[in-house]
Amino acid sequence: MSVGVFEYLLHGNFRKISVETRDGNLVAREGERVFEAEVRRITANEIQFCFGGRSVRVYLVRDGERTFVSVDGREFAVSESRPEAGRPGEVDEKTAETSLRVRSPMPGKVTKIAVAEGEEVRKNQTLVIVEAMKMENEIKTAIDGVVKKIHVAVGDLVDAEKILVEIEPEAA
Amino acid sequence: MFGKILIANRGEIAVRVIKACREMGIGSVAVYSEADAAGLHVRLADEAVPVGPPPAVESYLNMERILEAARATGAEAIHPGYGFLSENAAFARLCEERGVVFIGPNSRALGLVGDKVRARQTMEKAGIPTVPGMTSVATTLEEIRAAARTLGYPVMVKASAGGGGKGMRIVCDEDGLVPALEAGRREAKSAFGDDSVYLEKYIEEPRHVEFQVLADNRGHTVHLFERECSIQRRHQKIVEETPSPALDPELRARMGETAVRAMRAAGYNNAGTVEFLLDKDRRFYFLEVNARLQVEHPVTELTTGVDLVRQQILIASGADLSFCQEDLRQRGHAVECRIYAEDPKTNFLPSPGRIAFLREPKGPGIRFDSGVYEGFEVPVYYDPILAKLIVWAEDREAALRRMSAALDDCAILGIHTTAGFLKDVVDHPEFRAGRATTSFIGKFFPSWGRGEEEEDRERLALAAVAYEALARTAGPKGRLGRDGNKDGATPWTTLGRWRAGGES
């Protein structure tokens, strides 16, 4: 019998899950929820769960801290540790200087920078346009404030989560 | 027959054409941008030629570079696929001038159907129904009122300088006409500096039904029945099927004949598609011609047994059609789902990146036309289509069940895809009932998120990751007590979905 408790991040939410395995059976618990199934490893990337008369194949692949999992054709990215910041494109956690970091929600190419450093911006104003796969995505500020720093230039290729602009909130 | 064909495209459609060439004993030349050096089409083609930097305008749309690649490799014909140069009359003309065969319609027909106004005029002259409307800009209120009565409500006020929905107003009855005209003119004035408007019949919740046509160089023209493409998101088709649940044999025959007549009127040759809007009262209107092989062509192939790419190549090489209209039959039902690199959870933001794991669905009646492979880095520069999942079965119900099961069985990891969303679309009762119109996605999927089933899947995903982590770390940790599950006694008897833990 094996027992373990694991802490994960899924869709930005913290999840704590415990598992026990014995004789090809698995019991997983998350808080008050319990899940039991027969479990069998098929290949390095394929696990079979049998429960309620149904068999479900789950595919998974590890990529550094993350594991990508496919269940019924849907993919989930499960992280082992908390990433440095919250959801992209939204207001981030405040830094020591209380400025707000606006991040790219997707990998892409910076096609336009709509503001300048020192400029006052209003909530929902477009800061940067990032284009990927023929689709333009306007990155906006979620707060009123002043553009403190612009971290990218037109033509830059950016990864998801890349900090694009820092906004100094308007003094209350 | 050609000895060698250059494929001026990338992704799944380039792969599709390369495979057709191989089967026909024709050499294939791929072209690729710097972002696609590791592309699947490059790996599969007999030869591959780089044509420029990643942006399409500098590579896949660079006519001179592509023609130079054809010259250098000795390719006698160019297959443009869809998108990129496929409907570019100037490119077709350039090919004709350079003595390279453009696998598509002649440049004159391509120019004609590509110009919406000229196409509409040509169709009207040929007696083909178009969306009714005023042929000139409205002047007096009386004139407009009379026109609205003739067209029949509802009508749509449109700005003649229009575009992007600006100045557009839907009018349901005569009382609404004056306010709509005023609002339309105001909006048109501020958007375009021109307040002239005209009226068009408003087609409510139309279906999008198109007919596949093949025409050889001697004018033999046949249609290969319809494709129903009403399931659209941002005016982009995502699910297509044939036959259309909205047609009966009589209407199908009438629309098919109209499609053939439309293509003859345009002097069209090779493969093309005539798009129609079909209203609630089963009236149909010519919309436009798609002068290329279409993304959704496989559903026609599976139900008619005709290989459209092979036919395109045969026609371009000067062969006559080897079958006539009477030889063609629709058999069974086919459905296609387009799998895009987009995240349905974040309103379909593009999701380029490395495909860490790929498992293609397989089985009877399942076809997977893919442009990617495990380990491939999906570039940020191009259309997000990764692959098309196409299924065939004896009837619609069986085909939709097969599609649903095949989507379950499709695993693409490392990036986000639309596969899970497509499954919900295919399983939706309204779609199952065959009632979906172009408003379907906006109406039934204003957003897509987590239902109870999705939460179960999430937990199953977490359990799988934890199971794997446990196997890796190996050996009992005995940390369960810290987690509040102090009972320790675990029943191994009942197996089931996640449930509240209390009763165990």
Image: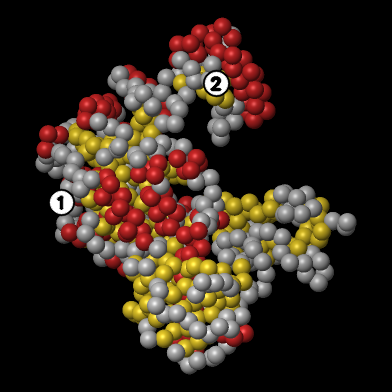
**Residue B14 shows in the view:** no
Q: Position of residue B205 (x, y in %)?
A: 44, 31
Q: Quadrant of residue B119?
A: top left
Q: Position of residue A139 (x, y in %)?
A: 65, 54
Left or right of A32 on screen, residue A40: left
The local crowd at label 2, few if under 14, some if 14 to 19, many if 20 or more residues have their Cα within 10 Å, is: many
Amino acid type indicated by mark 2: Val
**Residue B347 shows in the view:** yes
Left or right of B291 on screen, residue A66: right
* Chain-order first, disc 1 or disc 2: 1
Q: Quadrant of the N terminus of chain A?
A: bottom left
Of circles 1 and 2, the one toward us is 2
Task: Say above or below: B461 vs B51.
Answer: below
Q: Label 1 to label 2, Cα distance in Å? A: 56 Å
Q: Residue furthest right?
A: A172
- Residue at 84% x, 56% y: name it: A170
Q: Which mark is residue B171?
A: 2
Q: Residue furthest front?
A: B503
The local crowd at label 1, few if under 14, some if 14 to 19, many if 20 or more residues have their Cα within 10 Å, is: some
Letter of the chain that mark 2 sits on in the rendering: B
> Between B51 and B223, which is closer to the camera in this rendering?
B223
Q: Quadrant of the C terminus of chain A?
A: bottom right
Letter of the chain that mark 1 sits on in the rendering: B
